[in-house]
Amino acid sequence: MKITHAMLNRSEVHQNQLLSMLMAKMSDRIAGHLTIVGLPAGALLNATEPAEAYAYFPNAALISVLSVIENGKSAEIRVVGSEGMVGLEGLTGGRNPYIQARVQCAGTAYRLPARVLRDEFNCDDDIRSLILRYMHSMISQIGQAVICNRLHSIEQRLCLKLLMSSDRLGRDELTMTQNTIADLLGVRREGVTAAAGELRKLGAIEYHRGRIRILDRATLEKRSCECYSVIQKQCHHLHASAPKANSFRPRSALPWPTKMPVPLAVSPAHP
């Protein structure tokens, strides 16, 4: 997938909430470092760069953070969309080779050199507090994923996956196959097929050729596990306690970044 400058329509690209909160504090210092990049489905972020290369703030894209074992199998431990970021390892300069950030649904993101974010984190108390609150929310989500994967049914986990993906993309139509969902959940495809079939019978979703549309969120929320409300409360607490930015612009004198978007190459399915 190659994204050209003409495809970046301001009315279609969502605003990243975490970046907006950061911009409320340090707009003048980081605006010139932001670049809009295209994220094709399947791309691994920071896979070929140094560990401290970039922080990514998705707009209309969805990124799965995966835990990968030696035989190449993986399971999703958190999902990131327009509410957050990936690349926190840039603050420490370390990388865990068993953790991957893979683009699940193609779109765009703001990309910021991690050294810029690290400098702000080290010298600005407000920025450090905001990022630490986000890290706490992220750790809580990972911990909830461990419980969910261990104790809850495939149908409950599928409902959770669909709800969280929809929330972070800002739309009810998702591009993901049952095979993809099975890989993300770490279960057999047959289990996902059975659970999706039940949800379709209930009128909660419809799906066809890798596209899933949510028709009845109330039913999904009812049949999901408690993990959905726990994770949503964590996200709400983060954003409710943070400073509100005005209409986000990467640079006050320019309505849109001047750097051309950079398409990322799609990496192999497994390391």
Image: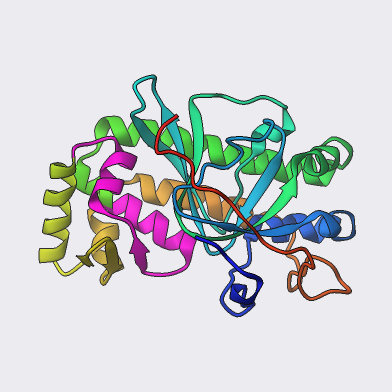
* 224 relative to 81 in the view: left or right: left
Q: Position of residue 228 (x, y in %)?
A: 38, 50
Task: Determine the main secondary structure of the stretch shown in magenta.
Answer: helix
Whether residue 225 is visible: no
Residue 249, image quadrant: bottom right
User: At 84% from the left edge and 41% from the top edge, which residue is drawn?
Assistant: 125
For residue 169, above or below residue 228: below
164 in magenta: yes
For residue 217, above or below residue 118: below
Whether residue 82 is visible: yes
The magenta stretch is 159-188
For residue 91, above or below residue 79: above
Residue 260, image quadrant: bottom right
* 21 relative to 163 in the view: left or right: right
Extreme-bottom residue of the structure:
11
199 in magenta: no
Q: Nearer the viewer, residue 229 or 30?
A: 30
* 247 relative to 146 in the view: left or right: right
Q: Position of residue 117 (x, y in %)?
A: 78, 43
User: At 22% from the left edge and 54% from the top edge, which residue is drawn?
Assistant: 223
User: At 52% from the left edge and 47% from the top edge, which residue is drawn?
Assistant: 234
Q: Position of residue 30 (x, y in %)?
A: 84, 54
For residue 181, above or below residue 93: below
The chosen color scheme is rainbow
Q: Which quadrant is the C terminus positioned in? A: top left
User: At 47% from the left edge and 67% from the top edge, which residue is drawn?
Assistant: 170
Query: How many marks are shown on the rendered structure?
Result: 0
Q: Nearer the viewer, residue 58 or 84?
A: 58
Q: Position of residue 31 (x, y in %)?
A: 83, 60
Q: Nearer the viewer, residue 34 or 140?
A: 34
Residue 53, image quadrant: top right
